[in-house]
Image (cartoon, rainbow, N blue to C red):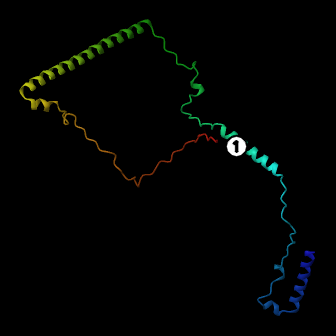
Amino acid sequence: MSVSLSRCVCRVATRCVEHNHAVNTSAWFVPVMTLKTSAPLRAEPKKKKKVDPRMEQLLRERLRKKLKRLEKVPPEYIPIEDFITPAKCQDETRQRPLPRLSFEESEGRALLLKEWCIYTQKQHMAETKAVEVALEAQREALDELKLVSEELYQAALKPDPLLFPFSHEGPANTPPKTIYEAPDGKYNDITKVYVQ
């Protein structure tokens, strides 16, 4: 129907144009080729299905139960891969065998170890004896100083800040370098993405 109507309108318009050339010059003239018609759309909105209120309530109850079940399940924690030892490193057979030493070599090492132990023991005893002698001399000097002058004795007991000079400067706020070009490093991103 609409197609036949549009053809009819096109014919009438072309005949009018052929008979009346004055229409071409008017601003109200529309060329026939631009006239287009579309088929009428006879559609209506979809009707809502009538839902039983009991069924709707049952669906809501099911959803609530599912949500409660999901809340009860504890969330899975993302594993920290640095704390997990790889299985290939846990293999006990993967050990480097110790080199077999000859009898002379093992005896020589044992004697060397004994000599080293004796040397370190003598060194330790000498250090402790030197500390004891120094403390005893200090004690005697303080006792003599106390007999001479009480003020000098109290001054000698105070710590000397110049004995161990210590100077400390805190971190300085420095602006970033404007000329610095950061190096472009290449790497393969093997980060695992966990979805909960």
Residue 161 spot, x, y in % from top left: 20, 36
Residue 121 spot, x, y in % from top left: 29, 14
Question: Splitting the image into 4 quarters, where does residue 160 fall?
Answer: top left
Q: Quadrant of the C terminus?
A: top right
Q: Nearer the viewer, residue 147 or 79?
A: 147
Residue 159 spot, x, y in % from top left: 19, 33
Counting other residues with Cα less than 10 Å from the Cα at mark 1, is it few (<14), some (14-19), or many (20 or more)? Answer: few
Q: Quadrant of the N terminus?
A: bottom right
Q: Residue furthest front?
A: 54
Mark 1: amino acid: Leu
Q: Is 54 on the left or on the right of 175, as rendered?
A: right
- Name above or below for residue 57 compared with residue 115: below
Q: Residue furthest left?
A: 148
- Name above or below for residue 95 compared with residue 26: above
- Name above or below for residue 170 compared with residue 73: below
Q: Nearer the viewer, residue 93 or 104?
A: 93
Q: Nearer the viewer, residue 45 or 192?
A: 45
Question: Splitting the image into 4 quarters, where does residue 166 fall?
Answer: top left
Q: Residue at x 74, y 45 (%)?
A: 63
Q: How many marks?
A: 1
Secondary structure at numbered mark 1: helix
Q: Is 125 on the left or on the right of 16, as rendered?
A: left
Q: Is 160 on the left or on the right of 98, as rendered?
A: left
Q: Residue at x 33, y 48 (%)?
A: 172
Q: Residue at x 56, y 34 (%)?
A: 81
Residue 57 spot, x, y in % from top left: 78, 48
Q: Is 61 on the left or on the right of 185, as rendered?
A: right
- Name above or below for residue 70 compared with residue 50: above
Residue bearing mark 1: 67
Q: Residue at x 50, y 48 (%)?
A: 184
